[in-house]
Amino acid sequence: MKISTKGRYALRLMLDLALNDTEKPIRIKEIACRQGISDKYLEQIISILNKARFVRSIRGPQGGYLLTKKPEDYTVGMILRLTEGSMAPVDCVDKEIIACDRMENCATSIVWKRLNEAISEVIDNITLADLVDWQMAGGGSYNI
């Protein structure tokens, strides 16, 4: 499994909105500048987030985007699944796909199930608020 730029940038976009929340809408161009990402690409990503009501669009000269919920109400898993789809490492453990008929007699399925559980355990238990805290504490370093 590899997270695409869409998923990574969506997470950075959401984090930027959370970090810069002054209850005033934030323009995509500002986020693009801070994040070093094309504003055209961010517009595509924000459209996905807006349709899912993760963000709210404010039109007009003072317009931009705001989070619709508090940062603690978003998980990394929610954002990644929205932009990337399933986070299952293989189809046979994806609940959205019909199970493999070899599943009961397949020893490797234990590996895939455990890997899927580990991925979900991480991404579903880290919130946007956690990312804000980590960023404020110094960025990429944290203690497990």
Image (spheres, grey):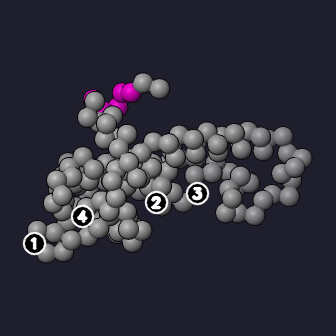
Asked whether disc 4 touches disc 3, contact meaning CB atoms under 8 Å apart, the reply is no
Image spot of residue 98 (x, y percent): 75, 64
Horizontal side of 92 relative to 24 (left or right) equals right
Q: Is residue 106 visible?
A: yes
* Mark found first going from the N terminus, 4 or 2: 4
Horizontal side of 90 relative to 131 (left or right) equals right
Label 4 – label 1 distance at C-alpha: 12 Å
What residue is rendered at 58% in x and 45% in y?
Answer: 120
Image spot of residue 61 (x, y percent): 10, 72
Mark 1 surroundings: few (<14), some (14-19) or many (≥20) residues within 10 A: few
Q: Amino acid at mark 4?
A: Tyr
Label 1 belongs to which residue? 61
Label 4 belongs to which residue? 65
Q: Amino acid at mark 2?
A: Thr
Image spot of residue 28 (x, y percent): 22, 61
Q: Give the quadrant of residue 107.
A: top right
What residue is rendered at 78% in x and 44% in y?
Answer: 109
Q: Residue furthest left?
A: 61
Residue 48, compared with residue 105, is above or below; it is below
- Identify the disc placed on residue 124: none
Label 3 belongs to which residue? 86
Label 2 belongs to which residue? 83
Which of pointers 4 and 2 indicates the residue nearer the eye? 4
Q: Amino acid at mark 1?
A: Pro
Label 4 – label 2 distance at C-alpha: 18 Å
